[in-house]
Amino acid sequence: MEYVLDKGVLTIGSTGENLPFTHYDAINEKWEGFDIDLAHLLGEKIGVKINFVKVRERALISGVATGEFNIAMSGIKRTISHTLISGMSRGYVYDDKEEIAILLPSFEKDFLDYLNAFISEMENKGELEKLKNKWIGS
């Protein structure tokens, strides 16, 4: 977290190929989706710019582990295997079969605590519900 604040940029890995969570429009060079909007809210909250890095799905975990990006957001399912390999935030989108969470390095305990508090705050303010209605529907 200190590194992100010092640099002034939060770099996020995403596939850009998982609507409604993330989509990259290569023609217009524009990112959109639930996770993209949530990432911008996070950037506003901590006062940093957001930089997205487009990667293949299988590179999300390795990119976080190697520091290619700080976190990954791409409609990532919170699974036991993901939590054993890396850190995962609490879920922010749920259905009866899965929950979507933010992937981060397992050693970033303070950042994990911050992300979980941020998700709780967005939930309490109704921001997650707004994003759900905008991108997923009711």
Image (cartoon, rainbow, N blue to C red):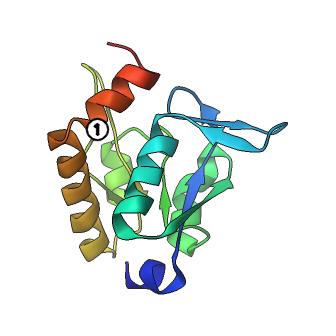
Q: Horizontally, is 61 left or right of 112 in the view? A: right
Q: Horizontally, is 30 left or right of 112 in the view? A: right
- State the residue lying farthest toward the left: 124
How many labels were placed on the picture?
1
Residue 130, horizontal then vertical, whole percent: 32, 29
- State the residue lying farthest toward the top: 138
Q: Nearer the viewer, residue 116 or 56?
A: 116
Residue at the image position 20 percent from the left and 40 percent from the top: 123
Residue at the image position 41 percent from the left and 45 percent from the top: 38
In the image, is residue 6 above or below residue 12? Answer: below
Residue at the image position 19 percent from the left and 50 percent from the top: 121
Residue 85, horizontal then vertical, whole percent: 40, 60
Q: Is residue 85 among the parts visible in the rendering?
A: no
Q: Horizontally, is 133 left or right of 31 in the view? A: left
Q: Is residue 24 among the parts visible in the rendering?
A: yes
In the image, is residue 61 above or below residue 16? Answer: below
Residue 137, horizontal then vertical, whole percent: 38, 14
Location of residue 51 (image quadrant) = bottom right
Q: Secondary structure at mark 1?
A: helix
Residue 1, horizontal then vertical, whole percent: 37, 77
Residue at the image position 33 percent from the left and 42 percent from the top: 78
Q: Amino acid at mark 1?
A: Glu
Q: Which residue is mark 1?
A: 127
Location of residue 49 (image quadrant) = bottom right
